[in-house]
Image: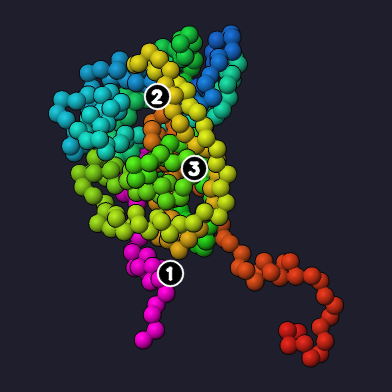
């Protein structure tokens, strides 16, 4: 009996994994707009996430000082809403815990003149009660009254009504995926910091965060969690076609530590393919929502995803074939 090639066996194993819906949580979007209302320009950092994360933390500590955390599974008793949002690992007593929200602001504008605007989003994952959403909205608006940056410059922040985020749709046919960072990302895979945009590391980060959000907010694993290790191994079947990545040195001011904190990150574009891509695509489609890598509440890891199709080898060969005259009657390739 002839042996089956290794790549064929691996492809069969991958196709036998039945894909499931990656995230069954409700997702709400809060769109916000910031306007400089002072007579002088407002200088901003290149990446706004750290500044906004810190400002939101201080505002929540005041606005939601007496508010309890939602009744989600595994939360420590007596914990407040502010503490839960700012320190999820302590709130869920787990080093694997992840924040049930993500901050989005990809603008690299460094100066906001009088009347100019800056916009972004706050995504809330899970069954948030209305009163908790209202407190988050109030805290966002309170940031403007408190002032931004170390100079405490006043801004006006307007927040639109919450809206549901639909499940991302996949195209009918695709063979490649292109992922482009809107903000730098900090990837870590199997205990090692990634110096590039490695597809396996990216997808494994999405698998981990999807599973962890289900555990924290719904009290159990998603349907596909039993195949987590198989899905994780399938990520290794993804292959890089093109990569244009660069290291980024992030420098942010920590009000809590009263010092500058340096962080290594990476930014750029990667295009990849592989026999596991159709299986893992549902998780990859959630990347713009979940972000990739660490510290999504600082706005890091915001990405865009595009799907494409590789042209067949014969199609590419015909494009480069030199033009010839009309075929002879005996030419077997003539129509």
Label 1 or label 2, whichever lies nearer to me, is: 1
Disc number placed over residue 196 in the picture, else none:
3
Contact flag, marks 3 and 1 (Cβ < 8 Å): no
Q: Residues within 10 Å of mark 1 (few under 14, many from 20)?
A: few
Q: Earlier in the sequence, mark 3 or mark 1?
A: 1
Q: Is residue 115 magenta?
A: no
Query: In the rendered image of this protein, does residue 166 appear above or below residue 66?
Result: below
Q: Secondary structure at mark 2?
A: helix
Start-end of magenta stretch: 1-29
Q: Residue at x 41, y 68 (%)?
A: 11
Query: Distance between the Cα atoms at labels 3 and 2?
Result: 25 Å
The CA span between labels 3 and 1 is: 26 Å
Q: What is the residue that sits farthest to the left in this orientation?
A: 77
The structure residue drawn at horizontal position 49% and vertical position 42%, both measured from the top left corner, is 196
Mark 3 surroundings: few (<14), some (14-19) or many (≥20) residues within 10 A: many
Real-space Cα separation, disc 1 to disc 2, in angstroms: 46 Å
* Position of residue 245 in the picture relative to residue 5 (left or right): right
Q: Earlier in the sequence, mark 3 or mark 2?
A: 2
The residue under label 2 is 53
Secondary structure under tag 1 reads helix
* Residue closest to the eye, 305 or 38: 305
Vertical arrangement, residue 279 with respect to residue 56, above or below: below
Is residue 18 covered in magenta?
A: yes
Q: Quadrant of the C terminus?
A: bottom right
Please provide percent x and percent y for residue 10: 38, 67
Residue 177's spot in the image, x, y percent?
A: 52, 54
- The answer to whether the residues at label 3 and label 2 have Cβ atoms under 8 Å apart is no
Q: Which residue is mark 1?
A: 7
Mark earlier in primary sequence (1, 2): 1
Q: Is residue 115 visible?
A: no
Front residue of this view, candidates 124 and 90: 90
Residue 162 place in picture, x, y as percent: 39, 34
């Amino acid at each position: 009996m002839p042996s089956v090639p290794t790549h064929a066996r691996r492809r069969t194993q991958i196709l036998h994994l039945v894909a499931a819906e990656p995230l069954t949580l409700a997702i709400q979007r809060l769109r916000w707009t910031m306007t400089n209302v002072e007579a002088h320009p407002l200088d901003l950092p290149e990446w706004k996430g750290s500044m906004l994360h810190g400002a939101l933390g201080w505002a929540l500590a005041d606005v939601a000082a007496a508010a309890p955390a939602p009744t989600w599974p595994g939360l420590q008793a007596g914990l407040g809403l502010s503490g839960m949002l700012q320190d999820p690992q302590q709130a869920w007593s787990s080093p694997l815990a992840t924040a049930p929200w993500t901050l989005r602001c990809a603008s690299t504008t460094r100066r906001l003149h009088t009347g100019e605007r800056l916009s972004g989003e706050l995504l809330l994952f899970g069954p948030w009660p209305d009163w908790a959403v209202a407190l988050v909205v109030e805290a966002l608006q309170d940031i403007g009254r408190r002032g931004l940056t170390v100079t405490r410059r006043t801004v006006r922040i307007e927040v639109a009504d919450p809206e549901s985020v639909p499940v991302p749709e996949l195209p009918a046919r695709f063979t490649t995926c292109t992922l482009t960072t809107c903000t730098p990302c900090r990837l870590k895979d199997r205990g090692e910091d990634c110096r590039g945009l490695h597809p396996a590391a990216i997808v494994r980060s999405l698998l981990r965060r999807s599973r962890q959000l289900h555990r924290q907010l719904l009290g159990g694993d998603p349907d596909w969690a039993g195949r987590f290790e198989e899905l994780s191994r399938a990520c290794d079947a993804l292959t890089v076609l093109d990569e244009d990545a660069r290291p980024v040195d992030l420098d942010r001011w920590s009000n809590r530590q009263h010092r500058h904190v340096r962080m290594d990150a990476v930014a750029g574009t990667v295009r990849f393919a592989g026999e596991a891509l159709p299986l893992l695509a549902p998780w990859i489609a959630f990347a713009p929502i979940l972000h990739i890598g660490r510290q999504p509440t600082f706005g890091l890891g915001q990405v865009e995803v595009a799907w494409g199709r590789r042209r067949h080898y014969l199609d590419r060969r015909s494009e480069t074939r030199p033009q010839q005259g009309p075929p002879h009657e005996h030419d077997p390739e003539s129509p």
